[in-house]
Structure formats: C-alpha cells, structure tokens
Image (cartoon, rainbow, N blue to C red):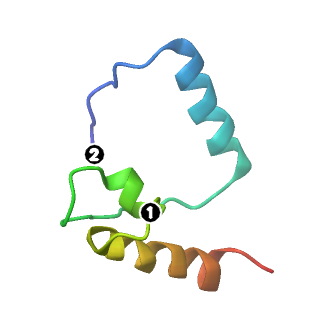
Amino acid sequence: PEFPILALTSEQFAMIEALDDVGFRKFPVYIHKVGHSHAAIIVRFPRKSFEEGKVVVKHWLEEEFEI
C-alpha cells in the first residue's frame, strides 16, 4: 500500500534505513488503550494502560530474538 511521506529530517530517514538494513522483521501493532503507542509498545512504565505492549515484548522475546 501507498503511505504518505513522513515529515522527517534526512538524518531521521537515514536512521530508519540503517535500522532496516539490520534485517529485523516488521509487524503491525495496534495499541488501543493509549494515544502514545510507542510508549505502550516498549512498556515504558509499569502502567495498566501499557498492558497491550507486553504482548509485543513477549512476541519479540519468544519468537524473534535468540537468547
């Protein structure tokens, strides 16, 4: 699908490209309980509203990273 171009600096686009080059698989994540989805995805604080992010962290630990 076509997405609009983000209003980012050239340095920010370079960071995105560098992260893409690492080879992580990308997954869509839908966070419904809070407006700050990134904070919830990484479970920035132990808040009830960030509970949905624990599913994301669990997925990465169990399915993506080899420890």
Amino acid tagged 2: Pro
Residue drawn at point x = 32 percent, y = 54 percent: 37
* Above or below 61: residue 35: above
* Above or below 24: residue 66: below
Residue drawn at point x = 52 percent, y = 74 percent: 57
Q: Secondary structure at mark 2?
A: loop
Residue density around tag 2, few if under 14, some if 14–19, many if 20 or more, within 10 Å: few
Q: Residue furthest front?
A: 46
Q: List x then y, in percent, for residue 39.
A: 40, 54
Closer to the camera: disc 1 or disc 2? 1
The N terminus: image quadrant? top left
* Above or below 6: residue 55: below
Q: Mark 1 highlights which residue? A: 45
Q: Which quadrant would residue 10 be assigned to in this image?
A: top right
Which sits earlier in the primary sequence, circle 1 or circle 2? Answer: 2
Total numbered badges shown on the rendered structure:
2
Nearest the camera: 54 or 6?
A: 54
Residue density around tag 1, few if under 14, some if 14–19, many if 20 or more, within 10 Å: few
Q: List x then y, in percent, for residue 58.
A: 53, 81
Q: Which quadrant would residue 25 be assigned to in this image?
A: bottom right
Q: Residue furthest top?
A: 10
Residue drawn at point x = 48 percent, y = 14 percent: 9
Q: List x then y, in percent, for residue 61.
A: 63, 79
* Above or below 2: residue 36: below
Amino acid tagged 1: Phe
Q: Which mark is residue 62?
A: none
Nearest the camera: 36 or 26?
A: 36
How far, Cα to Cα, is label 1 from label 2?
A: 33 Å
The C terminus: image quadrant? bottom right
Q: Mark 2 highlights which residue? A: 1
Q: Secondary structure at mark 1?
A: loop
